[in-house]
Amino acid sequence: MIRPILATLVAVFLCATAAAAQTAPAAEPAAESGLQSILQEHHDLVERASRQTVQTVLDALIDSEDEAVPAFLERWQARELYMRNADGLFVYVQNDRADPLVLLDIETGAELGTAGSRDLTALRPNRGVQTVIGAALVQFQLLADDPATRATALQAIERAPEPGQLHMIGRMLDEETDPALRDQAEWLLTRMTIAFAEDEAQRVAAIESLAGDVRVQARAALNPLLLTDRRVAEALPRDANIARVLEPGSAALPRADAYAMLVAAGLAPQEVTAQMRRDALIANITNGTVAGIQVHQLGTEAARARAYAALAAAGAVPPAPTEAEQTAALAAHVFYDEYREPSTAVTAAAAETVAAINTHVGLLEAIDLSLDGISLASIYFLAAIGLAITFGVMGVINMAHGEFIMMGAYTGYVVQLFIPDYTVSILVALPLAFAVTFGAGVAMERLVIRWLYSRPLETLLATFGISIALQQIVRQVFGAQARPFTAPDWLSGSLVFNDVVAISYIRIAIFGLGVLFFVLLWLILNKTRLGLEVRAVTQNPSMASSMGINPDRINMLTFGLGSGIAGIAGVAIGLFAQVTPELGTHYIVQSFMTVVVGGVGNIFGTLAGATLIGFLQKGIEWLNPSNTLAAQTYMILFVILFIQFRPRGIVALKGRAAGA
Amino acid sequence: MIALFRQNRSVPVMLAVLVIFAAFVTLLSEGAGTGALSTSLVKTLGMTTCLAIVALAMDMVWGYAGILSLGHMAFFALGGYMIGMWLMVARTEGVIAASLAQAPLPPTPQELTDAVAVQIFGVVGGNSFPWMWAFSHSLIAQLLLVVLVPGLLALVFGWLAFRSRVTGVYLSILTQAMTLALSLYLFQNDTGLRGNNGLSGLQNIPGAESVPQSLMSVWFLWASVAALALAYVFAAWVMAGKFGNVTRGIRDDEARVRFLGYPVEGYKLFVFTGTAIMAGIAGALYYPQAGIINPDEMAPIASIYLAVWVAIGGRGRLYGAVIGAVVVSLLSTWFTGGRAPDINLGFYTIQWVDWWTVLLGLGFVLVTLFAPKGLGGLIDLLARRTPQ
C-alpha cells in the first residue's frame, strides 16, 4: 500500500524538479504586465494569426496605449516574435543564430534566460497579416519624430485610404509642425472625411470646404460621391438617394436602351431585332419555304414579319413583343439614376460644390483660352506683319511670303549646325534670318516686282512661281523631311499658374517678339525719315517723287523690310513647328486673311486682324476641341462673311489713301 | 452661227482641231485603233481636254471679266464629287447585291442600303449615308447637282462678294479662302465625303462593266472633246455679243461702266456663276477618267495653277486658255512622268522629276515679265491680228 504512494510522490517530485531545472538559471519574467497579458488573453489569435482575426488583437493592443506596442508591432511584422512552447510566453531572442537562444522580455528587453531552438516556436505572420499589422503601424509612424517616416506614412495612407485611419490623421495634425506635411495631411483629412466620416455634417462641411478648389484632385475626391447606377423598378423606391428620373425615349435614355434594361432585369420579354429575326428565319428554312412562305419572297421587312409571326404561332420561335406591348412595358416601369452614396445631404452638397468648382474652372479656362488666343494671335501677327508691309503698304501680293518664313526657319536650323549652344544660336539666327530674307526680298523686288507695279494681280502669278521654285530648291537642298530646330532649355516648359491655367515659355517669347516688332515698326513708320518717305510713296508715288524722294529706293527698302520680318517670324515659328519645305504654305493664307480682315496699310489693322483671327480660332476650337480642321473651316467662313460687312477691314483707311 | 464663225475665226479652227484630234487619238488608241497610244495616255489626253474646259472658264472670268478667281478648281472638284457619289454608290450597290444574292434570304432594301453604306463609309467609321448622299442613287439627280452645287455656291459667294464691292486682290484672297475652307471641310472624316480618302474606283462605270477601260477611255475622250467644243462655242458666242462688250468694259474700268448705268454686279455674278457651272461639268467629266478624287484636288494651289495656265496661254483669248492648259499640263505630265532626259552637269545631275517645279516656277516669272500676252500672243503675232 505504501509503495504506490511513494512512487507517486517520487514522480511528482521529479516532475517539479524538472520544471524547476528549466527555469532555474533565469529570473522570472517581469510582472505580468499590460502587453504580455493582452497577448496572452488573445493567445490563440496571436499564435495562429490570420488576416481576418488579427484585427481584434491589434485593436486591443492599440486601445491599451502601451508604449511598447509600436516596437512590438514592428518586430512582430518583421517575424521576430517567438513563443516559448512550455508556457506560451511571447518573447524576442537576442540573436536567432546563437545556441542556445537568449530570450528577451517583449516589454523591458530584459534577458529571460536561454532556451534551445526546439523549445521555441517562431511566429511567422503571413503576408496578409503583415499587411494588417503594417496598417496598424501607420498611426505610430504618423507620430514618429522623423519627418521622412511621417511623409512615408502619409503616402501609404494616400495610396489606400481606410476608414479607420481617419482619426489617426486627426491626431497627427494636432502635433504636426512641418508646414508641407501639414498641408498634405490636411488635404488627406478632408478627402478621407468626405469618403469615410460617419457624421454626415462633418462630411458635408468637408465637401463644402472644397468649393473654389480648382485642383484636379479636388474634383477627383468629389466625383465618386456623384457616381450613379441606372436602375429600373415598378415604382420609385422611397429610401433610395435618387439623382434623377429618366424618361424613356429622351436623349439621356433612348427607347431601345430603356427596353434593353427591362429585358436585362427580366421585366419584359426579349425584343426581336431585324438581325435576330433574319437568323431565326434562316434557321427555319424547310424545302425553300419558311412557315409556308417562299424564301425568295422574304426580301421585305413586312414579309419577314409575317413569316416570323407564322413561326411564332407554330411555336418554333419565341413571339416578338409588339410595339404596343413594348410601350406598355416601358410605361409600367420607372427608370432612374440612383447615387451610390446613400446620404442625400452629402450628394446634394457634393453636386453643389462640384457645380461651384466647375464655374470657377470655367472662368479659369476662359483665361487659359485667352492666353492661347493671345499666343496664336502673336504668331499670326508675326507671320502677317511683313505681309502687311508688302501687301498693305505697297499693294504687292507676295505669294512667296510663306517661303520667306520657311527660309527664316531653315536659317535657324543651319545656324544650329554650326553653333551647338541653343541660346547663342538663336541670338545669331534672328539677325541672320533677317539679313537672308531681307536680301532675298530686295533681290526679288529688283528683279521681278518692280516691273509689275502697274499690274498688281500679276505679281500674284510671278511670286507664286518664285514660291514653288523656292520650295522645290529647299527640298532639293535639305530634303523633304522635317529638320530639327531646337529651342534652348530656358524656353522649354511652361509657366504654370494652377491646374487649369498654364502657358509655355516659348509662346510668351513669341508674344514678346510680336510686341517688340509692333513697337519697332510703329516707330519706323511714324517716327523716322524712312517711314515718312514710305508713307509718302504709298499715298502718291509721283508726288513723292517730285518732292525729292526716290520711290525705287523706298520700294526696295520697304519690300526688304517686310521680307526680313518674315524671316524673323520664321525663326520664331520654326521653334515650335516642324521645319519642312512646306512650312510657309501653312501660314500664307492665314496671313493674307489677317491682313485683309485687319485692314490694309496699317499695322494697327494687322494687330486687330491677328487678334480677331487668333481668338476666333481658339474659341471655335474650344467649342469643338476634337477638330482643328473644322475650327479653321468655320474661321474662314467667318472671315468671308466679315469681309461682306467691312470690306476694307477692321481698321479702314479713310479719305484719299483708301483709294490708293 | 455662221456670223460667229466669221467674227471669231478661232472658233472654226478650234472645232476642226478638236475633231481631227479626237479622230486621230481614236485611230491610234488601244480600244478602237492601232494601239499606238496606251490607254493611260488616252486617259491623260481626255483629262487634259477637261482641264482645257475649266481653263476656258477661268479665261472668261479672269481674262474677260477681270475677276482673278482662285476658286474655280474648287468648283471643278465639286462637280467631280457630285458625279463620284453616284458612281461609287451605283457600283458598290452592284457589288453588294451580287454578294448578298448568295445569302440564304434575299436582302431587304434596308439591308442592302446598310451594307452599301458600311462598304463606302466603313473607312471613316460610318455605317449610314450622310444627308448629302440623299440623291446619290439617282444618276439624274446627281447630274443636276453637278450643275447646281457649284452654281449655287458661286451664286451665293459671288452675290455676297460683289454686293459689298470686294474687288481685285481682295476678291482673289477671298476666293482663295473659300477654296481653303472647302478643302479643309472635306478633309474631315465626319463631313460625309470620306475625308481625305476621297472617292475612288470612279473609273468603273456602273452598267458598263463589260466595256474595257481601253474603249471607255476613248468614249470619255469624245465626251470631253464634245464638251470642250460646246464650251468654246458658248464662250465665243457670249463674249462676241453686247454681253461680252460690257464684260470687257467692266474689266477695263468697272466704275465707268457702272456710271454708264449697267448693273455691273449682275454681269459679274452671271460670269462668275456660269463659269463655275462650266468648271463643275468639266470636273464631272474629268474624275471618271482620273478614277479617284480627294480634297487635295481642291487645295488653293490647284486654282493658282489654273490661273497660271491661263496666264501662260494668254488671257483674253479663248484659244490662249486652251493652249495654256494643254501645253502646261502635258509638259508637266511629261516631266514628272520621268520620261524627260536628265541633264548631267558633271558635278550634278538635274533630274526633271524634281527640278521641273523649279523650271515651271521660273517659267511663270518669265512669262509674266516678258510675255504678258502669253503663248496666245505668239499666235496673234503669226496671224497678224490684234486681240479683241
Image: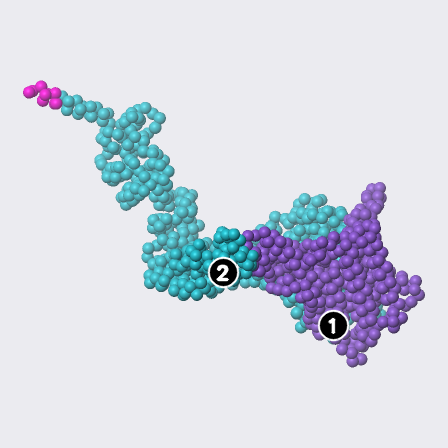
Q: Is residue B297 visible?
A: yes
Above or below, B95 against A151 in this view is below
Q: Which amino acid, by three-letter code, is at mark 2?
A: Ala
**Chain given the colour purple:** B
Q: Nearer the viewer, mark 2 or mark 1?
A: 2
Chain A, chosen colour in render: cyan
Per the image, label 1 sits on a secondary structure element best described as helix
Q: Residue at x 78, y 49 (%)?
A: B337
Q: Mark 1 sits on what residue? A: B269
**The quarter of the displayed image where residue A518 is located:** bottom right
| Total tally of numbered discs in the picture | 2
Give coordinates of residue B71: x percent, y percent: 72, 64
The residues colored magenta run A1-9
User: Does the image show residue B358?
Assistant: no
Which residue is at a point 43% across and 65% down the rendered structure image? A324
Instruction: Work out whether A139 lies above or below A195.
Output: above
Q: Which of the numbered marks, if any, corresponds to residue A305?
A: 2
For the point 40% across and 47% down, which residue is it?
Answer: A160
Looking at this rendering, what residue extends furthest in the left direction?
A1
> Which of the chains bears the disc numbered 2?
A
Q: Nearer the viewer, residue B114 or B331?
A: B114
Type of amino acid at the residue the image marks with label 1: Leu
